[in-house]
Every structure is written in structure tokens, then in C-alpha cells.
Image (spheres, coloured by chain):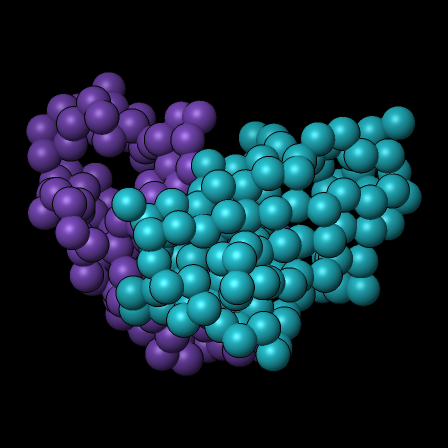
Chain colours: A purple, B cyan
Amino acid sequence: QSVLTQPPSVSGAPGQRVTISCTGSSSNIGAGYDVHWYQQLPGTAPKLLIYGNSNRPSGVPDRFSGSKSGTSASLAITGLQAEDEADYYCQSYDSSLSEDVFGTGTKVTVL
Amino acid sequence: EVQLVESGGGLGQPGGSLRLSCAASGFTFRNYVMSWVRQAPGKGLEWVSAITNSGGRTYYADSVKGRFTISRDNSKNTLFLEMNSLRAEDTAVYYCVKKGVGDAFDVWGQGTMVTVSS
């Protein structure tokens, strides 16, 4: 049972903007711990997409952006492309569990 | 090139043991916290265990505490996960992961599949 909740799926047409929410609590996101986002393409290992709430590693297109407010965080994908079809996971640290925690995951479908 | 390569997965018996290894290259292994993250078939990601850069402190998810042991050999740039008292629910792909930029999991291995079944 994950402590970070994401919508199971989101979809959009090519070129559209989609957002994925990550809802936590006062022991993780709300406690000030950073949120990171990962992209997992079908059949592959996850890849770091956003770190420290809103920072992109080298090589990640600026179509991907992250934000955090209160006990939640969001990942936005603008100019949606077919290659963005993947599973996306948020991740933070939970002080009550004393461990890193992942979100439930969101499948992005490009219509 | 920064790389993590896992090995040691396979079929394990319920109550049995397996030992996973992860060979690191392309970065100064001894400087970084390392972790194992697993993913059951068709499910999400689950953090399993972590070890500090020196190996002096280890951490475990409640689901594996007392059964799994994480360790590292900094002289050989290798991370290990000793898995004992295996259960069917341990069936998953196990990823070796480096903690880096911003304390995020910035490098992932390709994963090794562990199947627990009689």
C-alpha cells in the first residue's frame, strides 16, 4: 500500500498537455522532502525524469516539468508525443516509515 | 559510461535463498549510497533496501526485514542482496539503483528477475 497516490491513467492527443498528480501527506511531501519522477518505457528499467521537485537531468526534454505544493506534486508533459507513452512514478521519503516511497504509478496513453 | 549490471536472479524455492549481485562501473562507487528496488509482475515500484557509501549502515523495507541482507564490496565495485526465507510475494524484477543527484535514484540497472515457486 503506497503512501503516495497517483491516478492510474491519463491520456491525451499528440501535442496536448497532460498532468499527473502525486498526493502524499505531512510525513513525506508535506514534511518538505523532495519529489522525484521516473519514466518507465514498456519492458525497460525506470529512468530519472525530474529530481528535486522541478529539475531535469541532462538529456530530458523541457517538455517535462515538475512542481510541488503542500502535500502534493505534479508532473506536466506539454506537446505530448507518441514516445511519451509509458508508466510514470513519483518518489519521495517518508519520515514515519523511515524509507523511500514510490507513488502508485500512472500509465500515460497517447491517443 | 555509468552502468549497473545485475546478476544472480532465477528460480528460487519457497523458504530458499538467492544472492543477487550488481557490478558498478563508470563512477566512484564508494562515494554513493546504493539501493535495491523491486517490481512485481504488472505492479509498481517498491523500495527494498539501502546501504550507505561505506557500508556502515543498512536499511530495509518491513516486507524483507530479517530475511534480506544488503552488503557491498567497495574494492570490487559490487553491491549484493542476500535473500533468505524466500516467499512467493518476493517474485519480482530486482533493480540495483544508485542514489545521486538531489538524492534521487539517478542510475538504474537493467534488472534481474527473481521467481519464487516450487
State left or right for residue B53 relative to residue A65: right
Farthest residue to the front: give it.
Answer: B75
Quarter holding residue B14: top right
Q: Could you say where residue A94 lies in the image, as x and y percent from the top left?
A: 51, 71
Give the residue drawn at x 18%, y 55%.
A56
Q: Could you say where residue B65 lies in the image, as x and y percent from the top left?
A: 75, 64
Residue A19 higher or lower than B105, as above or below:
above
Tell me if I can see residue A7 in this picture.
Answer: no
Q: Could you say where residue B92 lies in the image, as x and y percent from the top left?
A: 64, 37
Residue B45 higher or lower than B75, as above or below:
above
Residue B26 higher or lower than B111, as above or below:
below
Residue A53 higher or lower than B4, as above or below:
below
Q: In which quarter of the image is the C terminus of chain A?
A: top left
Tell me if I can see residue A34 in this picture.
Answer: yes
> Relative to the observer, which residue lies in front, A89 or B5?
B5
Give the residue drawn at x 46%, y 77%.
A26
State left or right for residue A40 relative to residue A57: right
> Relative to the observer, which residue lies in front, B10 or B47?
B10
Quarter holding residue A108: top left
Give the residue drawn at x 82%, y 45%.
B17
> Relative to the observer, which residue lies in front, B96 or B27?
B27
Give the residue drawn at x 29%, y 28%.
A85
